[in-house]
Amino acid sequence: MRLKSNDPCWCGSGNKHKRCHGDRQALSYPPVHLGGVSAPRPVPDVIVRPDYVATGTVSTSRSPQVQDAESLVRLRRACSVAAEVLIRTGELVAVGTTTDELDAVAHSIYVELGAYPSDLHYQGYTKSICTSVNGVICHGIPDDRPLEDGDIVNIDVTAYIDGMHGDTSATFHAGTPRAAVAGLVDTTREATLRGIAAIRPFEPLQRIAEAIEPFAESRGYAVIREYGGHGIGATFHADPHVSHHIDRSDDHIVVPGMTFTVEPMLTSGRPTFHQAADGWTEHADDNRPSAQFEHTVLVTDAGAEILTVTADGATAVGTLDSISARR
Ligand code: MF3
Ligand code: CO
Ligand code: CO
């Protein structure tokens, strides 16, 4: 059940939700206006591109991605590169930094690591990451808007290397976090990890949504329905569609070797949104802030393994240990 504004806050403060993490004042931001977008950044010729960069069209084959030992080695590499780009770019989030500066830094790290930024020239997209600020639900295009104190920004990184895509995202605070907004961000991170921890081989994909949606609602947040995770590997966006809200018509069963993303978007407002004139940016209709985290995961014989970590196990998103310790 969704927490109501007069209920005691989920954080245990003893205050009403509307006087605590549900404080409307703290959850209100001016709309994020679209800014100036710089030219696409060049990628050295030695870096191998996915097919859609040359053809301009994305293959319609969306079959589920199931890895064997050989393809898994390559996918692990792509995922570790994505994790490193996300960590190093996230470190630069600060008041006054523009999202285009984040794109420039991310771009140079992909190239340094020998990877192609999967977003660049994907279905006409012209930047190397997505940066979604405050009331932008997803697919924000990096531009010349400087981040302001109290802003949140999701950075979404997808790296293509060795014929595989690795996809991961995290939400970062610029300046001093507002407590109510930090609650949204922390809850979205935990929801993502709980969703991953719920995965079991030969059981319904829907276990993910069953772990995420009631948890989000118990804290007063709503789950975005129209966007979900996706199969990933040699194809960027493949089947299955990974719903983060409970959908009883979804009868997918997961099997060991399958790889897909878990990437819930939670909003502190109503979960309806509209697309900007740029054809990408999805703005919440009520402009209330939303957060998102994303990992690429592998279904194993016991559950799921997070692939979007560096060789040292680092990630800006979090690991399953970080939630089991608290449960
Ligand atoms: N990385 C996004 C996802 O999680 C997709 C971005 S596609 C782009 O699936 F074209 F917008 F970059
Ligand atoms: Co992504
Ligand atoms: Co994704």
Image: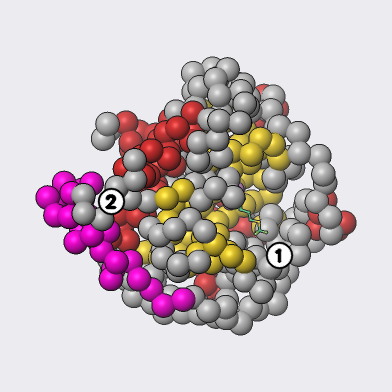
Residue at x 33%, y 36% (from the top left corner): 323
Residue 78 image position (x, y, % from top left)? 63, 44
In the rendered image of this protein, does residue 143 appear above or below residue 156? Answer: below
Which secondary structure, mark 2?
A: loop
Q: Earlier in the sequence, mark 1 or mark 2?
A: 2
Q: Which image quadrant for residue 109?
A: bottom right
Residue 61 image position (x, y, % from top left)? 81, 39
Q: Is residue 86 left or right of residue 26?
A: right
Per the rendering, the mark at residue 125 is 1
Q: Is residue 86 left or right of residue 61?
A: left
Residue at x 84%, y 59% (from the top left corner): 56
Q: Amino acid at mark 2?
A: Lys
In the rendered image of this protein, does residue 241 appear above or below residue 222? Answer: above
Q: Is residue 27 magenta?
A: yes
Q: Is residue 222 left or right of residue 7?
A: right
Does mark 1's beta carbon lie closer than 8 Å to ligand 1?
yes
Q: Amino acid at mark 1?
A: Tyr
Q: CA distance from mark 1 to mark 2?
A: 39 Å
Question: In the rendered view of the protein, which quadrant contains the C terminus?
Answer: top left
Residue at the extreme left of the image, as rendered: 14
User: Which contiguous range is marked in magenta?
Assistant: 8-31
Residue with the mark numbered 2: 4
Per the rendering, the mark at residue 219 is none
Residue at x 38%, y 38% (from the top left corner): 214
Residue 93 image position (x, y, % from top left)? 42, 67
- In terms of secondary structure, what is the magenta stretch mainly? loop
Does mark 2's beta carbon lie closer than 8 Å to ligand 1?
no
